[in-house]
Amino acid sequence: SDDANATLEAEEVLQLMEESYINGDASVAPSCHSTNVPDKAARALALLRRANEQYEAGNVDARPNISMYTGVLNACAYTKGMKEAKAEALRIALEIAEELMGSPSLQVDGVAYNTLFQVYGYLIGDAEKQARLSSALLSLRQRYILNYQGRMTDL
């Protein structure tokens, strides 16, 4: 959305949903769809963490999925502004990449993989750093290929 307040409004709606759910109204239980609001990296990460907290508290519909993780990566890739903001976005993106590589339940897809390429391309200007981080990306790529091949053999 072009509306600068869209994220704040979405967060307010999410907060109301969480409060209602906690107070016993299961009809407004937050889900992975209601918390996938791509915005600046820190806010996107906070929404992902909130969804995970909801999931761990028993709301199975709030379990973070690959789209939510990709939303955080997308927010990181498109972070603009000062060097500090970009450094924080890169830190968050690396944290998410590590989580993706270590997760047995998340299936990394082509969209997440391409979004990581965008993160590296947009946020890392130093060729040496790009080379070091490419190993993480290659690891994710290998996992994606293995997952894809596994699905192909199931057909």
Image (cartoon, rainbow, N blue to C red):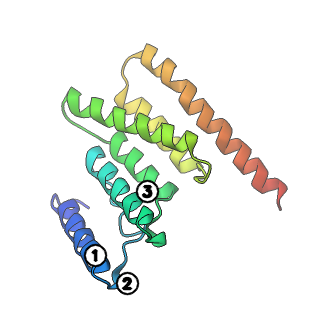
Q: Earlier in the sequence, mark 2 or mark 3?
A: 2
From the top left corner, tell me how far across and down residue 90 is, in percent.
Answer: 35, 33
Asked whether the residues under the numbered discs 2 and 1 touch, taking CB atoms below 8 Å apart as contact, a structural biologist would say no
Q: What is the spatial separation of the Cα atoms under label 3 and label 1, in whole angstroms?
A: 18 Å
Q: Which residue is mark 2?
A: 26
Q: Nearer the viewer, mark 2 or mark 3?
A: 2
Question: Would you place residue 27 above or below residue 142 in this image?
Answer: below
- Residue tagged by mark 3? 68
| Horizontal relation, residue 150 to residue 69: left or right | right
Which sits earlier in the primary sequence, circle 2 or circle 1? 1
Residue placed under numbered mark 1 in the picture = 17
Taking the spot 21% from the left edge, 29% from the top edge, the residue there is 84
Q: Residues within 10 Å of mark 1 (few under 14, many from 20)?
A: many
Give SS at disc 1.
helix
Q: Residue at x 26, y 51 (%)?
A: 43
Q: Residue at x 47, y 63 (%)?
A: 63
Q: Is residue 17 above or below residue 137?
A: below
Q: How many C-alpha atoms fall within 10 Å of the one at disc 3: few (<14), some, or many (≥20)?
A: many
In this view, the mark in front (2 or 1):
2
Disc 2, disc 3: CB below 8 Å? no
Residue at 50% over, 19% down: 132
Residue at mark 2 to residue at mark 3: CA–CA distance: 22 Å
- Please identify the quarter of the rendering in which residue 35 is found: bottom left
Residue 137, x across and y down, in percent: 55, 32
Taking 134 as reference, is 85 left or right?
Answer: left
Dividing the image into 4 quarters, which one contains the C terminus?
A: bottom right
x, y percentage for residue 12? 19, 68
Q: Amino acid at mark 3?
A: Met
Mark 3 element type: helix
Residue 23 or 147: which is nearer the viewer?
Answer: 23
Q: Amino acid at mark 2?
A: Ala
